[in-house]
Image: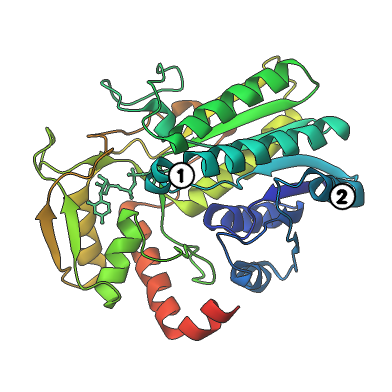
Amino acid sequence: MSKVLVTGGCGYIGSHTIVDLIENGYDVISIDDQSRSTPYPLTGIQLITGKRIKNYKVDLKNFDETLAVFQENPDISAVIHFAAYKAVGESVEQPLLYYENNIGSLVNILKCVKEFNIQHVVFSSSCTVYGNPDRFPVTEATVLQEAVSPYDATKQMGEQILRDFALSSNTQVILLRYFNPVGAHPSCLIGELPLGKPQNLVPVITQTAIGKLPKMMVYGNDYNTRDGSCIRDYIHVSDIAHAHTLSVDYLRTNNSQNTCEIFNLGTGNGITVLEAIHTFEKVSGENLNYEIGGRRPGDIEAIYANNEKAIHELGWSIQYNLDQMMQTAWAWEQRIKREEDTISNN
Ligand code: WQD
């Protein structure tokens, strides 16, 4: 059984990807220092898959400790690298924290990949690398604009580091550019666990609906869009997760001449903030307490994906629609409410 190392395995997308890898026959270990996560998802993974995942609670900025994990697991055949800080606003306030963590961790992982001659690496990138595009849908060939935050810059730099590393080694790399991951595993045993007050739209919606937040703001309805609110490409986290498994499959079975491939992971559907809110209200039966406020600094007006490359080359397909994204997000929020103590103390 091929062993895959997942960094950030206790995180939102990492935990969903571990489930998908196991369900597709892979052996998985995780490195997650739990500085931005909790051990709770490991319980959910075991309940869903029946497998107990070993997580090494190691800070990837510590090279010796990271190397020790590879020395203990010389049979790692692929690495999926999720571990990174991802709060855009925090990155503006503390850029050095982001460069040290996101770039330092990546470089350490790649030094270990080189030391153990690991052939396959999949990298968690983001649609934020496109900046504020002026043509839609964006393809993988869309020219990247200048990063608008240190977080965005760490993703653009991460892609460049991996391109250069792939050219200088035997390692083949896949860069996955996520659009907006939302929702939760249909079992409701794992989902998004935002630390503190959430910034992202869907957890803000569900926390407002459950009463954790008194109300929510729609950040602007004066954009040049069909209802004035921003457009994004929301994609179910389980669809994102399966694309990682397909990427490892692709690297193992394709003798692609390309050392570095890029894939957009989005549905191709642009949805406005107000449409997302109304869809949530429809599937949940809840009336959301929201107000129209001013624009949020740094927000782009619109972005959505051309996902044809992932569909045709990875064999990827979208399994979840917007209703199901909102329904699973809401079911997960209700579960968190029921088990608040268990989740926060684990
Ligand atoms: C979506 C839309 C907001 C909250 C994403 C990821 C982020 C990062 C960059 C991921 C925007 C509006 C939101 C609220 C609102 N990296 N909104 N009220 O900004 O597209 O960022 O890409 O890899 O993690 O989330 O996502 O969910 O923050 O916002 O009106 O309370 O919802 O203005 O238009 P965004 P988001």
Question: Residue 278 at what x, y percent from top left?
Answer: 18, 58
Disc 2 vs disc 1: which is toward the camera?
1
Q: Residue at x 30, y 27 (%)?
A: 132
Q: Residue at x 54, y 72 (%)?
A: 189
Residue position marked by numbered label 2 in the rendering: 68
Residue 215 marker: none
Residue position marked by numbered label 1 in the rendering: 94
- Mark 2: which amino acid? Ala
Question: Residue 233 at what x, y percent from top left?
Answer: 33, 41
Sequence-wise first label, 2 or 1: 2
In this rendered view, identify the residue nearer to me: 234 or 33. Answer: 33
Question: Residue 33 at what x, y percent from top left?
Answer: 67, 58
In this rendered view, identify the residue nearer to me: 291 or 288. Answer: 291
In the displayed structure, does residue 231 sit left or right of residue 142?
A: left
Q: Residues within 10 Å of mark 1 (few under 14, many from 20)?
A: few
In the displayed structure, does residue 105 sit left or right of residue 269?
A: right
